[in-house]
């Protein structure tokens, strides 16, 4: 089960609405609990979608989407390996909603995990609007 999805910038959660950009990296974090223990988790996934830019400062269709893996091994922004809190650090600011050049519009981040049998957990979603 995944709970408590967060997008952090400079250690502070980003929620709901973003109006200013920054050059700090995004950190994505999710808490994972597994009935059989964390050793049964095969992967933790973050699926993102973001708007595409247009020439009027707003957003339009044609944005990007994709998936990245989150880690609980002391890498990718994870500070305590093995604690069940998975992270993905975005140092190049490719999927973050707060970057200096991030287009306006809706950003959606959906987290889930899969166990070693391929069973998918619930999903946890964070939606942020860049104005």
Image (cartoon, helix red, strand yellow):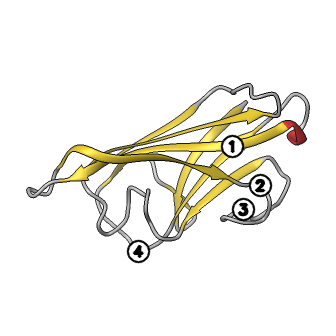
Name the residue beneath numbered marker 2: 72
| Residue at 37% over, 65% down | 99
Q: Residue furthest front?
A: 117
C-alpha gap between disc 4 and disc 2:
25 Å
Q: Earlier in the sequence, mark 2 or mark 3?
A: 2
| Residue at 73% over, 66% down | 75
| Residue at 66% over, 55% down | 87
Q: Position of residue 105 (x, y in %)?
A: 26, 46
Point out the frontmost of discs 1 and 4. 1
C-alpha gap between disc 2 and disc 1:
9 Å
CB under 8 Å between callouts 2 and 1? Answer: yes
C-alpha gap between disc 3 and disc 1:
13 Å
Q: Is residue 128 left or right of residue 86?
A: left
Q: Position of residue 79 (x, y in %)?
A: 75, 65
Give the quadrant of the N terminus.
Answer: top right
Q: Earlier in the sequence, mark 3 or mark 1?
A: 1
Name the residue beneath numbered marker 1: 44
Point out the frontmost of discs 3 and 1. 1
| Residue at 73% over, 43% down | 43
Query: Observer-nearest residue: 45 or 80?
Result: 45
CB under 8 Å between callouts 2 and 3? Answer: yes
Q: Position of residue 121 (x, y in %)?
A: 69, 27
Name the residue beneath numbered marker 4: 23
C-alpha gap between disc 1 and disc 4:
26 Å
Q: Secondary structure at mark 2?
A: loop
Name the residue beneath numbered marker 3: 78
Q: Secondary structure at mark 4?
A: loop
Question: Are there few (<14), some (14-19), or many (20+) residues within 10 Å of tag 4?
Answer: some
Q: Secondary structure at mark 3?
A: loop
With respect to residue 87, does 2 lie above or below? above
Q: Is residue 131 visible?
A: no
């Amino acid at each position: 089960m995944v709970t408590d999805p967060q997008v952090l910038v400079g250690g502070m959660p980003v929620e709901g609405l973003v109006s200013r950009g920054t050059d700090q990296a995004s950190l994505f974090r999710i808490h994972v609990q597994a009935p059989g223990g964390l050793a049964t988790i095969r992967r933790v996934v973050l699926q993102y979608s973001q708007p595409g830019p247009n020439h009027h400062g707003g957003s339009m269709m044609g944005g990007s989407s994709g998936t990245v893996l989150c880690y609980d091994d002391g890498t990718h922004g994870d500070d305590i390996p093995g604690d069940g809190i998975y992270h993905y650090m975005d140092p190049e600011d490719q999927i973050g909603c707060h970057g200096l050049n991030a287009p306006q519009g809706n950003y959606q981040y959906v987290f889930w995990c899969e166990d070693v049998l391929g069973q998918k957990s619930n999903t946890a979603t964070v939606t942020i609007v860049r104005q």
